[in-house]
Image (spheres, coloured by chain):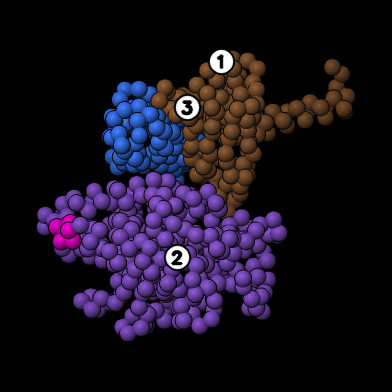
Chain colours: A purple, B blue, C brown
Amino acid sequence: MKNTSLKRILGTMGFAALMGANAAFAGADLDKELIINGETKIVTRTAAPTHMDGALDEIFSGWIFRKDETQAAQMDDFDNPGMIFVDIAQDTWNTVEGSEGKSCASCHDAVENSMAGVKATYPKWREEAGAVRSIDMEINNCRTERMGAKPWKLTGGKMTAMNALVTLQSRGMPVNVSIDGPAQSMWERGKEMYYSKTGQLEMSCANCHEDNYDLHIRADHLSQGQINGFPVYRLKNAKLNSVHARFKGCVRDTRAQTYKPGSEAFLALELYVTSRGNGLSVEGPSIRN
Amino acid sequence: MASGVKPRVKVPKTAAAGSSITIKTLISHKMESGRRKDKEGNVIPRSIINRFTCDFNGQNVIDVAMEPAISTNPFFQFDATVPEAGEFKFTWYDDDGDVYEATKSVAIA
Amino acid sequence: MELTRRNALVVGAGAFAATFLPFQAYAAADEAIAAFTGGADVGTDGITLISPEIAENGNTVPVSVDAPGAVSILLLAAGNPEPGVALANFGPLATKQSVGMRIRLAGTQDVIAIAKMADGSFVKTSNAIKVTIGGCGG
């Protein structure tokens, strides 16, 4: 499946302290297919985008690396607990809040129509804002600028639920974020972060998710760290988790001071990591460990 | 836990008379076990849904007594017979006395 | 009993066993089973428990029990601080006496299912489920 490059061997050696003897663990079934509700085919394996320049030959959704029962729970929206929060967000979508007497629906009508395809291209450069924006930033911008409502906490339940509702409208569409033009400098910054070692453990994102995916870090089966499945319902904390909350957890695990959710650094990383999944399907809300 | 509790139930809209259908239910609930501690070291009091029932036109399908070992956002899957057209009623009973209900109608195909 | 060195070891081992949590918890499970069955004989045929061999996460472990003809099924997690998980009673419109749910397991342990049949007899089965500790912050 993968070439045993020198880089990979060296990367694995660097992990000796953390990685157990994994002879007992089988690798993931990379050919397994994800079809949700018997109708929505999800691309979980495809050729790596050209910008990765051969760092990986193929990219895989994190779904591939989960155990059978977790995979199965994502095949039916009535097994997927993340969908309860989509239902809650649908109610919120139609609820008037703030000084302007508006709901999301006041401007955007039916979410099925107005938000179809939106998640597939975010984060992206917004000319009006003169900046790269994430879905979460757009949601809070609507709340403060159009609704006259308080912004939501970026990693809180209301935000992750609304993000999941918006994401669902693009489920099955290919992730396709732009990395050139005015977004390029942000993307370059994210790429530099991805390959920079941080923390007392001196680990970069790439050390786990590029050099050692499909191996185990203690009992955890490492994925490529793709974020096409966010927001994710994690079995660990039994709630929907945002991309920035997950980044924070990863950076913390390297024993580094983390960036804040919503910071420009994490936005840059979100853009870059999203672009590594260009070609996979938008999959959220997904289920992971 | 009265706020933000949302049930989600899968029942087919139609079924043949006398046939068996698979039902799946989820409900958002923390299911606080009573064994966790907060940052100050105080035990967070138990607060769970302790019973779930499903009935069809007043006849019982399943009645489950639930303990704190049921996961957050409880899920149940089971099979029910649909003898005639009617309505499934799902009821969750909270420790705090709240009762959450959902209903789903089934027509005979 | 004369307190010889050998006897001291035996007493010590007993005290150790009494304080060692899994043994205590399994005793609690035995008590729960006895309370459910009233001490009746328990067979092993006609009940199936489906569970993962290794759970992805102990916080959310999918299990399902099937016991055709059962009136009720008691599910216990023998190694949890409290062994009780759920008691499912089946009504006249249950097509199958079968139920699936997601449960919490505090660690690697046996999950036990006991069904009470319509004739008042009992059957039991159990599965070992491994719960591992993750590498990425639990």
Using the image as rendered, state which of residue B62 and residue B83 is in the foreground: B83
Q: Mark 2 falls on what kind of element?
A: loop
Q: As drawn, is A134 to the left or to the right of A71? A: left
Q: Mark 3 falls on what kind of element?
A: strand
At x 45% / y 81%, what residue is drawn? A51
What crowding class fits label 2: few (fewer than 14 Cα within 10 Å), some (14-19), or many (20 or more)?
many
Mark 1–mark 3 distance (CA, rounded to whole Å): 16 Å
At x 58% / y 57%, what residue is drawn? A220
Residues indicated by labels 1 and 3 sit on the same polypeptide chain:
yes
What crowding class fits label 3: few (fewer than 14 Cα within 10 Å), some (14-19), or many (20 or more)?
many
**Please, what is the three-letter code of the amino acid marked with disc 3?**
Ala
The numbered disc on residue A43 is 2
**Which residues lie in the magenta part?**
A104-109
Chain of the residue displaying label 2: A
Using the image as rendered, state which of residue A154 and residue A279 is in the foreground: A279
Residue A285 rendering spot, x and y as whole percentages:
39, 56
At x 64% / y 67%, what residue is drawn? A15
**Please, what is the three-letter code of the amino acid marked with disc 1?**
Gly
Mark 2–mark 3 distance (CA, rounded to whole Å): 39 Å
Using the image as rendered, state which of residue A214 and residue C4 is in the foreground: A214
- Quarter of image, res C134: bottom right
Q: Mark 1 falls on what kind of element?
A: loop
> According to the image, label 3 marks what residue?
C88
At x 38% / y 69%, what residue is drawn? A174
Q: In this rendering, which labeled residue sits more in front, label 1 or label 3?
A: 1
- Prevailing SS of the magenta stretch: helix
Q: As drawn, is C7 to the left or to the right of A38? A: right
- Quarter of image, res C25: top right
Which quadrant holds the C terminus of chain B? Answer: top left
The numbered disc on residue C120 is 1
